[in-house]
Amino acid sequence: MKIDVLTLFPEFFSTLKDWSIIGRAIKEDILNIDYINIRDFSKDKHKRVDDYSYGGGPGMVMTPEPIVDAIDSVKTERSRVIYLSPQGQRLDQDLVNRLSKEEHLILLCGHYEGIDNRIIDHYVHEEVSIGDYVLTGGEIPAMVVIDAVTRLLPGVLSSEQSFTEESHYHGILEYPQYTRPYDFRGLKVPDVLLSGNHKEIERWRRYQALKATYIKRPDLLKKANLTEEDKEILKAIEAELHNRS
Ligand code: ADE
């Protein structure tokens, strides 16, 4: 995959190339990232890239020309231009999966009060938000997208299992995990995990995953693809929690 990040702060991303899994994906040529400084495309003698908002109001708006020239410098027919913005579609694992199948992402990071809206209307394929809060710019959201997408690229994680079983991959949360010591300050690992009975362990994990989702993120259960067996398990979970209270 090729990613071009268009930003006023390319230096912000300098650590990514050395960073664990992303660093390895870059070294192994699974991922190729370039950072393009939008300011390099300013024709203003002071290299300005922002101006006052038509109609008045506080804050500066990024001007269209340097942004379009920056996009044009990297764009091909197969590029997908993503603008990171709190007004975008909220990023979730489904969106990450879809983005990970693209050949070329252009991640446009805004600053100041935003960018001239003609860019969004005519040059951006989609707007993506990382959550309902406002950050000072699109750089951190772009990093979030890069991280979430990279780990899904073929060859990045060692076994498919490591992401297929994780939180959100199947729309429910992950089962709890434990490692040594068996007894940590009196807190013991559930015995079923030491039983060697793989069927039992699998059943216990599904129960715990559904229970965690039921307690922490019940909203996910409405969208999840639950089997008939899952629905039975959920009834047992409801009964367990009801009896406890
Ligand atoms: N830029 C500023 N806030 C943002 C957010 N929540 N998501 C994506 N881009 C942003």
Image: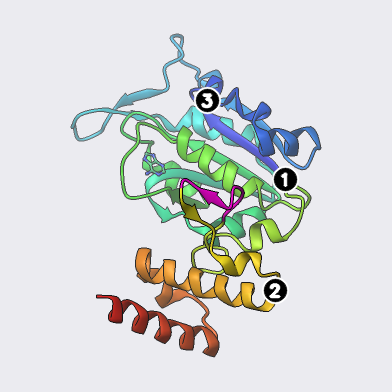
Going from N to C along the chain, the mark reached first, 1 or 2, is: 1
Q: What colour scheme has been applied to the protein in the rendered image?
A: rainbow
The residue at the far top in this view is 45
The amino acid type, in three-letter code, at marker 2 is His
Q: Position of residue 28 (x, y in %)?
A: 81, 37
- CA gap between label 1 and label 2 equals 37 Å
- CA gap between label 3 and label 1 equals 22 Å
Q: Main secondary structure of the magenta part?
A: loop
Q: Is residue 233 left or right of residue 195?
A: left
The amino acid type, in three-letter code, at marker 1 is Met
Q: Is residue 144 left or right of residue 20?
A: left
Segment tinted magenta in the rendering: 178-185
Going from N to C along the chain, the mark reached first, 3 or 2, is: 3
Question: Helix or strand or loop: what does disc 2 sit on?
Answer: helix
Going from N to C along the chain, the mark reached first, 3 or 1, is: 1
Residue at position x 48%, y 83% in the image: 233
Question: Helix or strand or loop: what does disc 3 sit on?
Answer: helix
